[in-house]
Amino acid sequence: MTSDMTARTLRLLSLLQTRREWSGADLSDRLGVTVRTLRRDIDRLRGLGYPVDSSRGHTGGYRLSSGTGLPPLLLEDAEAVAVTVALRTAAGGLTGIEESALRALAKLEQVLPRRLRGQVTALQTSLAGITWESRGPRADPALLAALAFACRDHEIITFGYADRHGRTTSRRAEPFHLVDSGGLWYLLAHDTGRDDWRIFRLDRITDPVPTGRRVPPREIPGADPAAFVAARLSAAPTRYRAVATVHAPADRIRARTRYLATRIRPVDETSCRVDASDDSLTRIAQTLAGLDTDYTLDADPEVLDHLRETARRTLRATD
């Protein structure tokens, strides 16, 4: 009996961490217990230090909120601060574990006491690291966490969004997924004003505001958020055109330039076409240099001039 009760209590805690709010009826149904038993289990969690809020009425329910102390993750305050800062850095710094870090960050910040939030913010704003390679704008960890909550809860949000020319418009959207691509974070969402799926660069999003309105999740075309975002990015207009016909199989080039996955098209078994078009001449040069094999290039005059000047500088440096 005791082991069953413990397992059920842990299951209850897990459910509370996966959604912003649960109705008593839903929790009882998920756990297979009566409402009275559910209330006793909620009291057990509170007794262990988990801050479970409840509200009465037809729309009432239970939610795991931030409280006066950390729930028993067996972390001391200093350890909790260190973990939160590390997760924020991993989520915003694109270290290769950003998606897992973001999920863990969302869970931890949901219950982080207010007194510790100030310490986290102070450390985050006071620490700096040396970056040897510029990889574009970093994502704001607070924005990442807020959007992760909205994606998880299927909650409509409003925000300002600046286009590539700097013009800002007001948007209202149903967040679906966060995707990292080529050193940038994107929000995949259904834009309610345009009644269409759109992708939004996080460094162009300002003032996100949750509306409190939740909607059933939509089905993304193709059922693969990453593939959908990659296809949209590959079709997006660019300032400079540069298409290389590469004398190597597509799979070999794709393994070396993963962020160009949808821009690599096989020509035959021994060659492929790589669309290296971009808004940045420097990035085009870096992409072509990374091919590490022979190719012919069809590109705008500005691209060719930049590549020639880069080559001349390199040759002068070796004289």
Image (tube, rainbow, N blue to C red):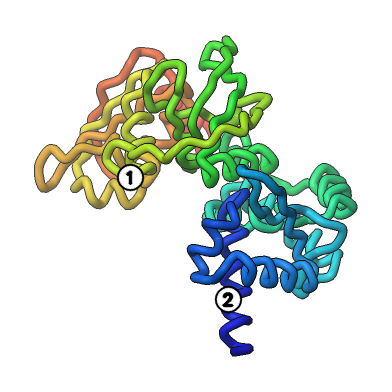
Q: Is residue 79 visible?
A: yes
**Nearer to us in this view, 117 or 203:** 117
Corner quadrant of residue 67: bottom right
Residue type at numbered disc 1: Asp
* CA neighbours of label 2 inside 10 A, class few (<14), some (14 to 19), many (20+): some
Residue type at numbered disc 2: Arg
**Nearer to us in this view, 278 or 39:** 39
Q: Which residue lies under the disc numbered 1? A: 224
The tag on residue 86 is none
**Left or right: where does residue 145 sit relative to residue 26?**
right
**Nearer to us in this view, 278 or 188:** 188
- Depth check, mark 2 against mark 1: the one in front is 2
Where in the figure is residue 296, as x and y percent of width and height?
A: 23, 30
Disc 2 is placed on an element classified as helix
Query: Which residue corresponds to the image point at 38% horizontal and 42% vertical from the top-left?
Result: 225
Where in the figure is residue 288, as x and y percent of width and height?
A: 36, 35
Query: Which residue corresponds to the image point at 80% horizontal and 64% vertical from the top-left?
Result: 70
Above or below — where is 212 with respect to 50?
above
The tag on residue 8 is 2
User: Distance between the Cα atoms at labels 2 and 1?
Assistant: 33 Å
Q: Specify which label sits upstream in the sequence, 2 or 1.
A: 2
Q: Quadrant of the N terminus?
A: bottom right
Query: Which residue corresponds to the image point at 26% horizontal and 31% vertical from the top-left?
Result: 244
* Farthest left residue in view: 268
Query: Which residue corresponds to the image point at 64% horizontal and 40% vertical from the top-left?
Result: 146
Above or below — where is 262 with respect to 209?
below
* CA neighbours of label 1 inside 10 A, class few (<14), some (14 to 19), many (20+): few
Disc 1 is placed on an element classified as loop
Q: Is residue 303 visible?
A: no
Where in the figure is residue 32, as x and y percent of width and height?
A: 49, 70
